[in-house]
Amino acid sequence: MRGSPTGAAATAVLLAACTSLFIGPDTDFDRTGLLDHVWRDLDRHYSLFVVKTADWDSLHDVYIPLGAQAPTDSALADVVGAMLSELHDIHVSLRAGSQLYRYTGFDVRPAFFDPGVVANYMTDRGPAPNGHMAFGHMEPEIGHIWILHFARSGFDTDIDTALARLADVRALIVDVRDNPGGQLENVVTVASRFADRDRTYAFRSFRDGPSHDDLSPPEPLVVSPQGARRFRGPVVVLTNRRSMSAAEGLSS
């Protein structure tokens, strides 16, 4: 399976301080110039234009006049935030002072998931040592591991603890519903406990040129068997519409 291309410029950060706005190094721009600078940074570095439907050139023509008309820095931030939201990408966000702008279209869709309902089916559900996941028995021979996110560290301890406590089951449910993602290495740590051999689960490319389709050759991403605790029985992975970013990798 070919993974979606990723790039270094997936997040745009805009800071407001007094009357000056800047992105990257503190540079003097008028409002039109700053908006154009943001647009050009994304045009040059953003790697997902090849899978997006947004016409980035047309958006420049739409938003530049709006930026020129913005009466305040705050109003300009609204314009820039709206332009970036056109990408429909949760990894592209903008911060202006205390205000965060991010695409939220995915939030309005029903998740069809209630952790409380799941917990009602277990009498022994408990948290892992680092709090990244919860686990227990759905049935005497069926275990359930709910992974809340893939951020921070300590996933090796948490997944090994869960597998040790569920060593008596013949099948496992690994639940990543409502998981917002995190670090890919944490996904690999978890997946390695279920791998029977080295397996390529995705391919990754990087933006490496001025054109939107200038991408590096696909690089295979591999998960290998690792860890003191391994599970070799049947595994079902549960996802939903809010399983995002790195969480999508576990279902690969």
Image (cartoon, helix red, strand yellow):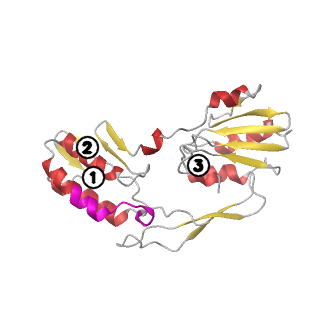
- Magenta stretch holds residue 56: yes
**Visible in this render: residue 88?**
yes
Relative to 126, is 162 above or below?
Answer: below
Left/right of residue 103 with respect to residue 151 in the rendered view: left
Q: Which residues are magenta?
A: 49-62
State yes or no: discs 3 and 1 in contact (Cβ < 8 Å): no
Relative to 173, is 87 above or below?
Answer: below
Q: Residue 94 location in percent, x, y?
A: 33, 46
State yes or no: discs 2 and 3 in contact (Cβ < 8 Å): no
Tell us which disc is closer to us: 1 or 2. Answer: 2
Disc number for residue 78:
2
**Residue 9 appears in which quarter of the rendering?**
bottom left
Relative to 48, is 208 above or below?
Answer: below
User: Considering only order in the chain, which callout, 1 or 3, is on the residue closer to the N terminus?
Assistant: 1
The N terminus lies in which quarter of the figure?
A: bottom right
Disc number for residue 23:
1
How far apart marks 1 and 2 lie (CA) works out to 15 Å
- Magenta stretch holds residue 93: no
How far apart marks 3 and 1 lie (CA) works out to 29 Å
Q: Which residue is mark 3?
A: 247
Residue at 24 percent of width and 60 percent of height: 60
Give SS at disc 1. loop
Q: Residue 186 location in percent, x, y?
A: 61, 49
Q: Which amino acid, by three-letter code, is at mark 3? A: Ala
